Amino acid sequence: MLVYGILLQLVISIVSANTASSKPCVLKSFNTGLVCVCNSTYCDTLIFKLPVKVGDVLIISSSKSGLRFHESQARFNESMKRIPHGPFHYGDGNSDTSSRYMNKIIKVVKKFEGIEEPLDSYVNIMVNKSNKFQSVIGFGGAFTGSVSYNLKQLSKELQDHIYQGYYSKEVGLAYNMMRIPIGGCDFDLSPWAYNEEPVHDIFLSNFTKLDDRDIEKIHQINELKKITKNQEIKIFGAAWSPPKWMKSNNDYTGFSVLRDEYYQTWADYHVKYLELMAKNGLPFWAISTGNEPLNGIIFPYFVHFMSLGWDPILQGKWVADNLGPAMKMSPVAKNVKLLGCDDQRYTLPGWFEQMYKGSPNSTEFLDGVAVHWYADKVTSADYLDQTAEQFPNKFIIASEASSGDRPWDLHKPELGSWNRFEDYFLDIIEDFNHYVSAWVDWNLVLDESGGPNYANNYVDAAIVQTGSELYKQPIFYGLGHFSRFVPEGSVRIKSKSSNKYVKSVSFLRPDGYTVVILYNMAEHYLHVNIFDHDHGALRLDLPAKSAHTVVYK
Ligand SMILES: *[C@@H]1O[C@H](CO)[C@@H](O)[C@H](O)[C@H]1NC(C)=O
Ligand SMILES: *[C@@H]1O[C@H](CO)[C@@H](O)[C@H](O)[C@H]1NC(C)=O
Ligand SMILES: *[C@@H]1O[C@H](CO)[C@@H](O)[C@H](O)[C@H]1NC(C)=O
Ligand SMILES: *[C@@H]1O[C@H](CO)[C@@H](O)[C@H](O)[C@H]1NC(C)=O
Ligand SMILES: *[C@@H]1O[C@H](CO)[C@@H](O)[C@H](O)[C@H]1NC(C)=O
């Protein structure tokens, strides 16, 4: 059926390959690519043992040709402690392949410092644990109204596969974060907010309990926590729109701003939500100042779903005078973190300079910055560096990503799409190399049309449900290459690749393990050397279009 034979080859000492304990992916082929299929009785799992001996290496690999979390082992070669400098010949360079191989490396090494692209296929990655950057907060996905609806269409067994697949630390991706819309968003059956009636009700007298849709969600999330035994999920919220009566256009979508007289009411609305959620057993870790504030003032002709427009100056005033103080006065909300912006990368860091103009106190209330991925391909990651530099005490999280939103895209799941895998994988690597601390995907599960979505804003998801089966898309595994191996509290360390076709990011975990994550973008094999001063060199052959998580002590 498949060319499954092009397996990852390790040049040195393969101790053993494959594990008996993981359930392998059952591949299904579509003309757009390969997915892993789960049904009510079968779903693939990821179970592995961390290497015990110093210098032993665990490698988990996924590739365009069909590897999904393939496990193998290797060992560092301790006699190669560093990339040799100066004129250096290894062996006679003639007969044995190893000598020729080493001389090739050395040729590359000479070019390394100038970061010239070597013409041949040998790539070096330098890892340096003493060079530390930001800490990791985690990974997750979003529990929207559509996700809640999709789960309800499925058998208990399939629901459990989704919960375990994402949130289990033993067999799944070990997600530890979850984004939840406050009221409705576009991924729902209709737009909605709390206290739609009575109108012009500054005391929110009808917002005394949660909506039935929230109760359903809380029930599902409690089930998820029980099944996965994962009780420490960082839940964070964002509102898309207030009830219509608080808005200048009295509508859920279109050009709008918050009416002056409801600045305090909109702040109180957030606090009430946080208090009610906590009372119902779902305390929040954070909220943002609102989803994509520019949709309501710059893009109302393109965005046909719930939004509230803000310019940053007015938002600065609202945060400093209303939202920030209201949160601090609530015994529940005062412990909830506040994230700024929650819009595309190009808004950074200027958004905060403008908020500061609105009120110098506004940015004081922010614990972190949330950023969406939709313009990343046309926006330099330097904006993230500038934000990190300007706010050294605030963390940056990537709070939303999905494929299929652009005008020229297929606006639905592209089953097995490796291009979409690559978009995700490279974006995550880039973000973490530029001070991002967490990466959160959009809808956890959608149907085959990429919905439901009342605004026809269909997109892809890492798990697609067909009613009787789940299709785990390549991006599911792409996310797992990070989330399962890089727990909260890990620190990004320096790693530098000598070749633009191999991207990498590295972390030091709280338990002392080093994690190097690599992607070979090339359409052919590349031979990679990972150099770690403490261990020597690790030689790997990476198949075309393949991703790898390398773990060692
Ligand atoms: C579920 O999937 C497994 C593995 O592919 C297969 O053996 C089994 O027949 C499937 N069950 C149903 C009911 O389709
Ligand atoms: C390790 O590297 C040395 C050269 O530094 C080489 O002589 C030796 O063969 C290598 N060992 C293995 C197992 O590849
Ligand atoms: C690793 O980084 C540290 C801190 O920046 C530096 O002092 C050291 O020289 C580096 N080590 C290597 C082997 O490059
Ligand atoms: C309160 O909201 C509910 C819908 O959630 C609505 O049916 C009811 O009429 C509202 N009450 C008032 C007094 O407007
Ligand atoms: C900023 O906060 C300080 C106290 O933290 C307060 O004295 C001052 O009035 C505030 N400034 C504005 C413009 O709100």
Image (cartoon, grey):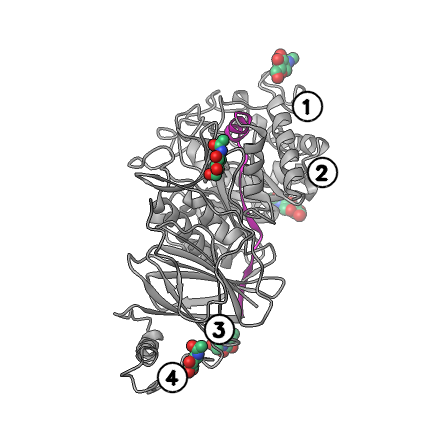
Determine the residue located farthest toward the right in the rendered image.
331
Which amino acid type is shown beneath numbered disc 2? Val
Q: Which callout, 4 or 1, points at the residue further toward the start of the chain?
A: 4
| Camera-side mark, 2 or 4 | 4
Q: Which callout, 1 or 2, points at the residue further toward the start of the chain?
A: 1
| Camera-side mark, 4 or 1 | 4
Callouts 4 and 3 close, C-beta under 8 Å: no
**Closer to the camera in the image, 399 or 244:** 399
Q: Residue at x 67, y 43 (%)?
A: 231
Q: From mark 4 to mark 1, how far is it between C-alphas?
A: 69 Å
User: Is-magenta flag for residue 28?
Assistant: no
Question: Tag 3, which secondary structure?
Answer: loop
Q: Pinpoint residue 107: horizontal percent, then vertical percent.
A: 30, 78
Dot 4, crowdedness within 10 Å: few (<14), some or many (≥20)? Answer: few
Dot 3, crowdedness within 10 Å: few (<14), some or many (≥20)? Answer: many
Question: Cβ of disc 1 within 8 Å of ligand 4?
Answer: no
Q: Which callout, 1 or 3, points at the residue further toward the start of the chain?
A: 3
Vertical placement of 68 versus 160: above or below?
A: below
**Residue 332: assigned label:** 2
User: Is-magenta flag for residue 142?
Assistant: yes
Q: Which residue is mark 3?
A: 76
Q: Which residue is mark 1?
A: 209
Question: Tag 1, which secondary structure?
Answer: loop
**Closer to the camera in the image, 134 or 172:** 172
Q: From mark 1 to mark 3, how far is it between C-alphas?
A: 58 Å
Which amino acid type is shown beneath numbered disc 4? His
Q: Pinpoint residue 424: horizontal percent, then vertical percent.
A: 41, 48
Dot 1, crowdedness within 10 Å: few (<14), some or many (≥20)? Answer: some
**Magenta span:** 131-153
**Residue 85: assigned label:** 4
Dot 2, crowdedness within 10 Å: few (<14), some or many (≥20)? Answer: some
Q: Is residue 311 visible?
A: no
